[in-house]
Amino acid sequence: MAPQSNLETFLGGFAKILGEQWQVDLLLKAGDTKEGEAISAHKLVMAARSEVIKKILEFDKFKASDGKIETVTLSELKQEELEALVEFIYNNRSMLSEKEKKHVQSLYKAADKYEIPHLRDLCRNELIASLNSSNVFNIFELSVIPIDSTLYDYAVKFIIRNLRTMCDSAEFKVFVSRNPDLSVEIMKASMTRRWNGQFCDAAFVSFG
């Protein structure tokens, strides 16, 4: 293995101290974390990456901990999803790792909830790139919690362009039962194959 460059060593500094468990002062738990599986982390790093986690750590109980290692539970995440989130936070990435791609939908929601915009951007790009008939309805529902206009438009255009082949699928029937009003709008748009004034037969534009 080639030695790391100075830049790679610099950018990997946070991941290095996490791997060494150097002066960790925080435990992170997922909703399904088992005894002994909590992830050790650093308050300063977590607060620097997430405004929401920073606010959590500003609660009085954390300020008055007197060196005690406190625990924060991210109950909406599963253990593997939390591990992927922490790995992303401690690494300087311009793209998602394979582990992060595996949990991209959960990480997208976590990035929105905990205000990690860079992670949300990368997850959005991956969700758009991976759109298919099996996941498009889940991705569409993600795009409205809260509204993400770019992801929303890509998902809707995909649905309209492929509605004829997907209308008998179980995924479509579940989607219609959950979103009757929006389903009507999609059906109306499919009649003209237009959405937001654009023809859905056109190729998708590139995204950044």
Image (cartoon, helix red, strand yellow):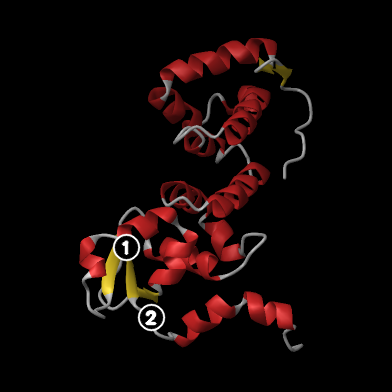
- Above or below, 195 against 96 in this view is above
Q: Secondary structure at mark 1?
A: helix
Q: Nearer the viewer, residue 186 or 11?
A: 11
Is 37 placed left or right of 138 in the picture?
left
Count neighbours of disc 2 (C-alpha within 10 A) and say few if under 14, some if 14 to 19, many if 20 or more: some
Identified by mark 1, the residue type is Leu
The percent position of residue 188, horizontal first and vertical second, equals 58, 11
Q: Is residue 74 visible?
A: no
The percent position of residue 18, horizontal first and vertical second, equals 48, 80
* Residue occupied by mark 2: 24
The percent position of residue 207, horizontal first and vertical second, equals 73, 41
Q: Which mark is residue 57?
A: 1
Which residue corresponds to the image point at 38% horizontal and 65% vertical from the top-left? 79
Which residue corresponds to the image point at 44% horizontal and 23% vertical from the top-left? 176
Real-space Cα separation, disc 2 to disc 1, in angstroms:
14 Å
The percent position of residue 126, horizontal first and vertical second, equals 63, 49
- Above or below, 109 against 198 in this view is below
Is 154 placed left or right of 107 in the picture?
right
